[in-house]
Amino acid sequence: MEPMAHVQSAQGNRPRARDLGIVVGRGDTGPLNAITDVPGVRVGHTTVRRPPDVHSGVTAVVPGAVGPRSPLPAGVFTGNGYGKLIGTTQLTELGTLETPVLLTSTLSAFRVADALVGWMLERPGCGEVQSLNPVVGECNDGFLSDIRARPVHEEHVRSALDGASGGPVAEGCVGAGAGTGALGFKAGIGTASRTPELAGGPYTAGVLVQANFGGTLRVLGRCVTPRSLGLTDDPAPVAETGSCMIVVATDAPVDARQLTRVARRAVFALARTGAAYSHGSGDYAIAFGTRPEAGAPVADAELGPLFEAVLDAVEEAVLNSLLAATTTTGFGGRTLPALPADRLLDALTDPAAPPLPDRRTRPAG
């Protein structure tokens, strides 16, 4: 199949999955194939990099004018709770999101939450606010970054929030993904979207992942490892001490209970990519709706297309996070290799490999 037009990664010349003819599922994407295809959703990154020891940062997902006076319906699902998802108990209890969602490094999460509170209290309409529930997720980037240095500070958080914009989303080694790795490769931030038909009309579901989990990468049903691609002779996996954070946004008419069901599917989708869901990997998804005034939610029996859209978008976003990232050597001289597109395509088109599942599209070449 012909490669599709796409938004380039942060590095400017790294392909996304669809450039390689790797198409996940049957649904159409939004124009950018990104979470910012959902109207009103903006993304900002601040990357904190001091080679060789620091590769970290913060990523902000900012849904419109969200605030304590204008909360959005939201749900959260915990696949494995080894993580520090700040704000989760109130989000679960009330089913509402009242701040942007920020992602960062594990030991920087608490500074980031404090900075988010300060930024929110300065927003219009928050002059009398005395209670606020910041939502901050994290991944452990300590394999490549000096995590104990806690390099993410208030100015980095404010820069990500103030610089958040619609349009193309940088992927790979940016923001909260600067020091993360997944499935044996350098990973980072990835995004994708789908436009499912439900409730009599088309809607958009967009996802953003901070990929930092263990397991064996599966692409179009085939296992791929750094060793199988000739990148290393070491059969030992990277230590699995990170969380995978997934943020889902949609303009579909769904309530908080249904968004919790959507968040479950987002975590389930990681299994498609080969996630091991290990003891040391916290796996979380937050899903929010952008239309609190949408009226009656769609019937549960009609949610199938939205569920499928989220499953496909998460799988593709993880692939995009890997393909956009570049080989990084960090703290202690440790290195995570990039996933090389040419070798990946060779592996996928190897006639000796097992056949592709019928539901997938065979890559070009």
Image (tube, rainbow, N blue to C red):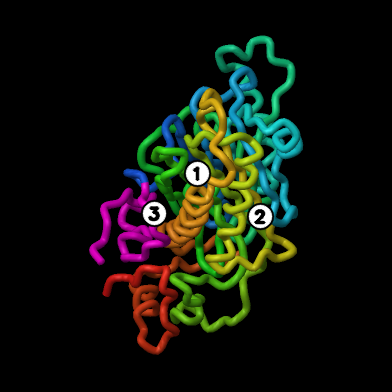
Q: Nearer the viewer, mark 2 or mark 3?
A: 3
Where residue 193 appears, as percent x and y from the top left, is 42, 47
Cα separation, mark 3 vs mark 1, equals: 32 Å
Tell me the quadrant of the picture where the N terminus can be found.
bottom left
Left or right: residue 45 compared with residue 240: left
What secondary structure characterizes most of the magenta part?
Answer: loop
Residue 106 in magenta stretch: no
Taking the spot 46% from the left edge, 33% from the top edge, the residue there is: 41
Q: Secondary structure at mark 3?
A: loop
Tell me the quadrant of the picture where the C terminus can be found.
bottom left
Where residue 86 appears, as percent x and y from the top left, is 71, 39
Q: Secondary structure at mark 2?
A: strand
Q: Which mark is residue 283?
A: 2
Name the kind of residue labelled 3 in the image: Gly
Name the kind of residue labelled 1 in the image: Thr
Where residue 206 appears, as percent x and y from the top left, is 46, 44
Cα separation, mark 1 vs mark 2, equals: 23 Å
Residue 24 in magenta stretch: yes
| Front residue of this view, candidates 264 and 167 | 264
Where residue 218 appears, as percent x and y from the top left, is 50, 71
Left or right: residue 212 compared with residue 23: right
Question: In the image, is residue 317 above or below residue 240?
Answer: above
What stretch of residues is rendered in magenta? 1-29
| Front residue of this view, candidates 155 and 215 | 215
Q: Could you tell me how many numbered marks the image carries? A: 3
Write down the residue under mark 1.
47
